[in-house]
Image (spheres, rainbow, N blue to C red):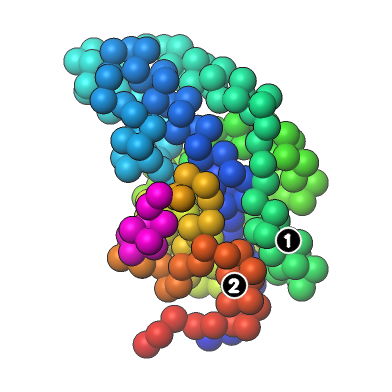
């Protein structure tokens, strides 16, 4: 199989090491609503790669009533306050991004987060110029990951057929969505949120359809640029 024409990046946990902050903010907001079992570890197991509308559905089910209207606002307030204390980039994956762009591959972001959160995260980590308007969020489609809608939307917007796209994801939901969209997918486990579960997450990503999984972004870059194809 030839080298892909486009690389579709997830954002949180792939280019920026934001997942520990996001999971902690989500845990704190749910616990403030009385959902005591909503620990950061529980959030990682259940909601990694899941969009906020799905989280709101689960919150409503747990509370037995509608999710508070200010849930998203309060979650983002907690998250952005954490950003102020430092939001690290995953530098080796950023270097891989720069390399892909230098080689002429098209690149974009496809994240289940809100458009406002994606843009704020990119601005905070000084990555905005690398993507311009090629930023696609769960708000752009009817169904978030693991449905294929977001991946297909991103491919259509950047003008590359799905079969020529490769997705880099840290969550099984994202990999499932990519495969359902007819794309290739590789898993990435280099984020700090997987420090205690890296091997287990690699298995989950493979089981979800990832053709390869890497903890080191340099290895992921080499894999993509050598046009490695999935085993028959």
118 over 196 or under it: above or below:
above
Of all residues, the one furthest to the left in this rendering is: 64
Q: Would you say residue 200 sits in the magenta stretch?
A: yes
Residue at image coords 75%, 67%:
99
Question: Could you tell whether 14 is left or right of 24 in the image?
Answer: right
Q: Position of residue 136 (x, y in %)?
A: 59, 45
Nearer-N-terminus badge (1/2)? 1
Which sits in the foreground, 222 or 112? 222
Q: Residues within 10 Å of mark 2 (few under 14, many from 20)?
A: some
Q: Residues within 10 Å of mark 1 (few under 14, many from 20)?
A: some
Residue at image coords 45%, 12%:
70
Q: From this viewpoint, is residue 44 visible?
A: yes
Rounded to the nearest angstrom, the CA distance separating label 1 from label 2 is 12 Å
Q: Position of residue 224 (x, y in %)?
A: 60, 75
103 over 231 or under it: above or below:
above
- Quadrant where the C terminus is found in the figure: bottom left
Span of residues in magenta: 196-205
Q: Which residue is mark 2?
A: 219
214 over 153 or under it: above or below:
below
Q: Which residue is mark 1?
A: 95
């Amino acid at each position: 199989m030839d080298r892909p024409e486009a690389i579709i990046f997830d954002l949180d946990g792939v280019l920026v090491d934001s997942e520990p902050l996001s999971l902690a903010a989500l845990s704190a907001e749910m616990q403030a609503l009385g959902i005591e079992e909503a620990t950061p570890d529980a959030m990682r197991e259940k909601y990694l790669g899941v969009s906020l509308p799905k989280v709101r559905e689960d919150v409503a089910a747990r509370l037995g009533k509608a999710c508070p209207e200010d849930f998203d606002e309060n979650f983002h307030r907690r998250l952005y306050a954490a950003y102020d204390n430092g939001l690290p980039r995953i530098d080796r994956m950023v270097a891989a991004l720069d390399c892909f762009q230098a080689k002429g591959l098209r690149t974009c972001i496809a994240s289940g987060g809100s458009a406002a959160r994606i843009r704020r995260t990119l601005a905070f980590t000084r990555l905005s110029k690398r993507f311009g308007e090629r930023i696609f969020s769960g708000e752009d489609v009817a169904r978030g990951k693991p449905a294929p809608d977001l991946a297909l939307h991103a491919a259509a917007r950047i003008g590359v057929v799905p079969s020529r796209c490769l997705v880099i994801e840290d969550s099984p939901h994202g990999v499932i969505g990519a495969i359902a969209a007819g794309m290739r997918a590789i898993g990435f486990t280099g984020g700090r949120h997987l420090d205690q579960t890296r091997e287990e997450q690699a298995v989950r990503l493979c089981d979800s359809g990832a053709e390869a999984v890497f903890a080191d972004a340099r290895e992921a870059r080499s894999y993509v640029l050598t046009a490695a194809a999935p085993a028959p």
